[in-house]
Amino acid sequence: MSNTSSQSLSLTRLSLIIGVLGLLILVGGVGLNNFKDLQNLAELMRVLGGILFGIGVAGLVTARRQAIYGFSQSRQARFGSQAVILSLSFIGIVALLNYLGMRHPLRWDLTENKSFTLSAQTTRILKNLKEPVKVTAFYKVSNSMRQEMINLLESYRDQANGKLKVEFVDPERQPGIALRYGISTSDVIILERGTLRKTVTGTQEQDVTNALLGVSREKKPIVYFLQGHGEGDPEDFDPAKGLSGLKQALEGENYQVSKLYLQASGGKVPADASALVIAGPDKALTPPERQAVADYLAKRPGRVLLLLRPQVQTGLESVVAKYGVQVGNNLVIDAGRNIQNDVSAPAVTEYASHPITKDLLSTIAFFPLVRSVQLISPPPQVNGLELFKSSSDSWAESNLKANMLVKKDPQDTVGPLALAVALSIDITPEAKVGTANIQKSQARLVVFGNASFASNGFARLLGNGDLLLNSLAWLAEQEDLISIRAKDTRDTKLELTNQQNQMVFYVSVVGMPLLMLVLGTFVWWKRR
């Protein structure tokens, strides 16, 4: 054996040893990457293993250069090299796409209800977090819901600007952590900020977001609902007039809901009120009660959401008239844009530019039995806006007698007609007011010519609930809650009648195979 051959053999053996050693170190570094405490060592092993493996490959190429050159001149090598180049190109493209996907992830949510996209409200709350929040999810590894919750909570973490830490715990494999939190079961999520803690047992986005609100706020705004005049009751479950759904939604967004009887409160709105809701009185308020509402607006300053019904004079019409709000004694009929061909239920799809409606641009809201509410010549201290209007094919029906014939009369005002207004009122607050919550220089007032859209039966439909909750959020100065909220996941099954089932059976099981048989027979006949 020549000296050159001996050196080549020695270099080949050394290169193989170095290459195999480098490959083993590289694989070990990849394996250690799963251990958080060994991240630095894992990275060092990956770099060192890659270098040694590269040296080994380079040494092999150098040692076998003559054999490689001779083989490269053969016909087999040329075709083989083309196959190798194509394979390596394909692998390189796939690797590059995966790398770009990891560095710049993109997601497309093609579900009907955007089930894998966080709502605008959740995103705004996450981006406005001021202090870190820890989320601990107790889900067994074998639980089918675990991956779904991982996807959801990772979406939360990605939107929180580093303020949300997420950890998943299997209570069976890590019983110590479960014991520390007092968890004896699975399918529970704990949110913590400092000493505040909220427990979530639901699996929907709104469940997690409501808990996030609970731990991210120091105190709950209090919303009072005026009672005693036939108003909607926040504890009434009646679909037509009850407001229990609104109460539940408010409490989910970390409000406190209370009833208010002015006769029992000394004729004043409580000092801790963040907003006062007057939801569709059936009879007029007494003069002292009207004065109490007027004083709350003009002296405190206050925040009032006023929902009115047609053909009911509450006495508050004169209170809001001082600020340029004209409430019509009419019923808006809209033949151009309504719900289910009911001309007495106008629908709106276009909104003025206001914090209440800025996220509702593609949302439909509707108002069964609504009167006009317009802003006419407001005083200088009022900054007001008509939130939305009926269509140009509407009119204000002024003939409100029983069994009336709905038709456009010469005296009826033609549309578009405003159906709601929002006002900011600059005032001088009372001196020495006791709480910082009401030491403001600006009152807020929102007036709707309809109260039915807030009821249990209608608030959950289309955009009615978002419009209502956005109005209260603006009044209570909870601006980060003004948005479109997450919707519950719907089970969209396809229900078929017996005839439709039979049609699907005959088309798929009988018709398609028979068609293939006929086409095959025709092709055979033509080629025979």
Image (cartoon, rainbow, N blue to C red):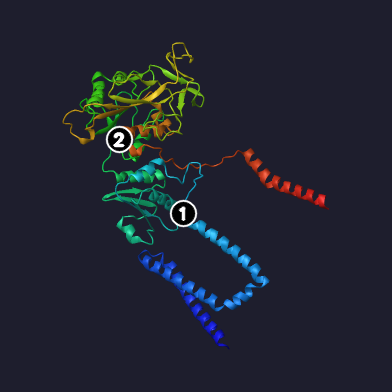
Judging by the rendered image, the residue that carries numbered circle 1 is 144
Image position, residue 123 (x, y; %): 39, 44
Image position, residue 456 (x, y; %): 40, 32
Number of other residues with Cα within 10 Å of mark 1, as a class: few under 14, some 14 to 19, many 20 or more: few
In the displayed structure, 199 sits above or below 42; it is above
Q: Is residue 68 visible?
A: yes
In the displayed structure, 514 sits above or below 318; it is below
- Give the spatial CA distance, label 1 vs label 2: 41 Å
Image-quadrant location for residue 355: top left
Q: Nearer the viewer, residue 404 or 502?
A: 404
Q: Is residue 279 visible?
A: no
Q: Nearer the viewer, residue 495 or 368?
A: 368
Which numbered disc covers residue 477? 2
Which numbered disc covers residue 265? none
| Tag 2 secondary structure | loop
Of pointers 1 and 2, the one earlier in the residue sequence: 1
Most extreme residue toward the left is: 432
In the displayed structure, 77 sits above or below 130; it is below
Q: Is residue 249 left or right of residue 76?
A: left
Q: Nearer the viewer, residue 23 or 309?
A: 23
Q: Is residue 3 left or right of residue 526?
A: left
Number of other residues with Cα within 10 Å of mark 2, as a class: few under 14, some 14 to 19, many 20 or more: some
Image position, residue 297 (x, y; %): 26, 26
| Tag 1 secondary structure | loop
